[in-house]
Image (cartoon, rainbow, N blue to C red):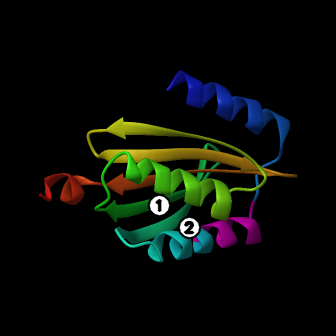
Amino acid sequence: MSDWSSQLKKYINAYPPSNGEDLRIMQEDIYFQLSKVEGFEVLRVEQTGKSERQVVAACISTLKDPFFKIVVAHLWQNDLAYDNEWHVFEEHELGTVLRFVTWEDAFITGEIWFDRKKGETDS
């Protein structure tokens, strides 16, 4: 977690937080991009009002590793993130989370949580 915390502090201190339209567009983009990929179901995407995680999404995925992380990283870097971005995958008892920060003139931070239990139990 220290890598995430240090990266977050670096960008939060260097750029102002995004708000309003930028956050709404990020919410819509996360929903749209993940919903169009087979093996993903988006349950919700919402704003939190917290600078360390402005947008939080919850998804279900039936994809298994390593394909899961390849697909999510590709989607994040090519279809969601601004030109500047940093992200990390973390495993938790509740699932896999992609923590991210992306910035241009301002930053957006967030988490996309994936419940992968269904995919792990498939034969």
As drawn, is 2 to the left or to the right of 117? right
21 is within the stretch colored magenta: yes
- Separation of marks 1 and 2 at Cα, in angstroms: 8 Å
As drawn, is 79 to the left or to the right of 22? left
As drawn, is 122 to the left or to the right of 5? left
Dot 2 amino acid type: Ile
Specify which label sits upstream in the sequence, 1 or 2: 2
- Which residue is labeled 2 in the image? 30
Q: Against 89, is 50 above or below? A: below
Residue under the image location 30 percent in, 52 percent down? 64
For label 2, the SS is helix
Q: Which residues make up the magenta segment?
A: 19-27
Which residue is most to the right? 105
Asked whether residue 48 appears in the rendered view, the answer is no
Q: Quadrant of the C terminus?
A: bottom left
For label 1, the SS is strand
13 is within the stretch colored magenta: no
Q: Which residue occupies the foreground of this view, 118 or 49?
A: 118
In this rendering, the count of numbered labels is 2
Residue under the image location 70 percent in, 30 percent down? 9
Residue 117: assigned label: none
Instruction: Please tell me in which quadrant of the rendered image residue 118 appears.
Output: bottom left
- Which residue is labeled 1 in the image? 57
Q: Which residue occupies the foreground of this view, 80 or 54?
A: 80
